[in-house]
Image (cartoon, rainbow, N blue to C red):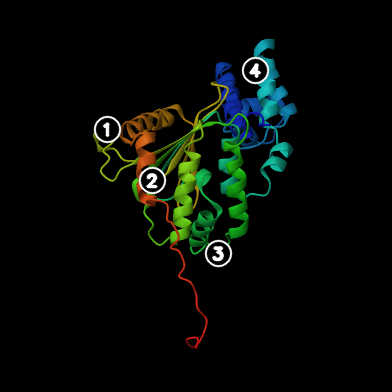
Amino acid sequence: MPLSASPVVRRVRLGAELRRLRHRQSLTLEQVCARLGWASTSKLSRIELGQSRPDLADVLDLLDVYEVPPELRTELIVIARDAATGRGWSKALGEMGERQRAYAELEVGAARIVEYQPAVVPGLLQIPAYTRLRVTAGSLLCDRVDVDADVRARALRQEVLRRPDPPRYTALIDERVCDRGGTPDDVWRDQLRHLLAVAERPHVTVRLLSRDAAPHGGVHPLAAFTYYEHPDPADPRTVLVETLTADLRLVAEADIARYELLIDWLLAAALSAEETVEVLGRRLGPPSVPRPREPRDDRVSEPS
């Protein structure tokens, strides 16, 4: 059973709505906080930026100050309750590090996900052995990484693609990701087989960008990113840009519009889903058939 709308997304939407209402009343942060008796503007600023879990009582006070009409008030109270959700999500997502949880909270509440990966197989499509190799390599740069916990978290995140009403997921992967490189042959082959198997699911699309792919105007993404749309079209679309040490979350309309245009260009340049399956199949080659064993003769000498 899917969870309700992502609290992370709802906090951003609630904050934007409250900021709009404050501006409509021509009130400054200081004026609002003075009316409510709040000690500083930082509390209201964090709520408007979607950076904190709001207290429903505080939201109700703000709605009073902004003189919000009943119908909109009811809608915003629902959003505020979603934004304040915590325990159910924490229990459902289990123990995860901060970065894994940021992805998980967006994935579980998404209606559509588009992911671009230039260097590794996307996390939602990795097999555990491949995940362990990648996380172990990453731990060389940060000795605080809990490899076992990260492998478990990645597997838990993948449940989103197996639920009864999964998001529509598109993976745009640079063809170089499918090179074996230093990956052990058995892990590499199992990972490619898994990509082929997952690509058969009706809600999953895997498309490769060939080595000579030329997106419109030669524009190539500079980093891996993931784009999220949500069931409620009024919720802000979100992009997470992956960096070495942290992930940048973008929700501004101008930023999102650029990434949507970039996605369109990448989709136009990528191999089709059918061509991608053919390329992955050729990489694997025909199924290997074990050579029959020669009869073994353990005798030391010829029979007399």
Q: Quadrant of residue 40?
A: top right
Q: In the rendering, at what x and y percent does residue 98 appear?
A: 60, 48
Query: Which type of secondary structure does the marked residue at label 1 adopt?
Result: helix
Dot 2 surroundings within 10 Å: few (below 14), some, or many (20 or more)?
Answer: some
- Residue 280 bears which disc, if any? 2
Kind of residue sitting beneath label 1? His
Q: CA distance from mark 2 to mark 3?
A: 34 Å
The quadrant in which the N terminus is found is top right
**Vertical placement of residue 255 versus 70, above or below:** below
Q: Earlier in the sequence, mark 2 or mark 3?
A: 3
Q: In the rendering, at what x and y percent does residue 119 appear?
A: 40, 50
Give the label, 2 or 3, closer to the camera.
2
**Vertical placement of residue 232 versus 202, above or below:** above
Q: Quadrant of residue 145?
A: bottom right
Q: In the rendering, at what x and y percent does residue 272 appear?
A: 35, 34
Dot 1 corresponds to which residue? 216
Kind of residue sitting beneath label 2? Leu
Kind of residue sitting beneath label 4? Tyr
Q: In the rendering, at what x and y percent does residue 63 appear?
A: 68, 19
Q: Earlier in the sequence, mark 1 or mark 3?
A: 3
Query: Which type of secondary structure does the marked residue at label 4 adopt?
Result: loop
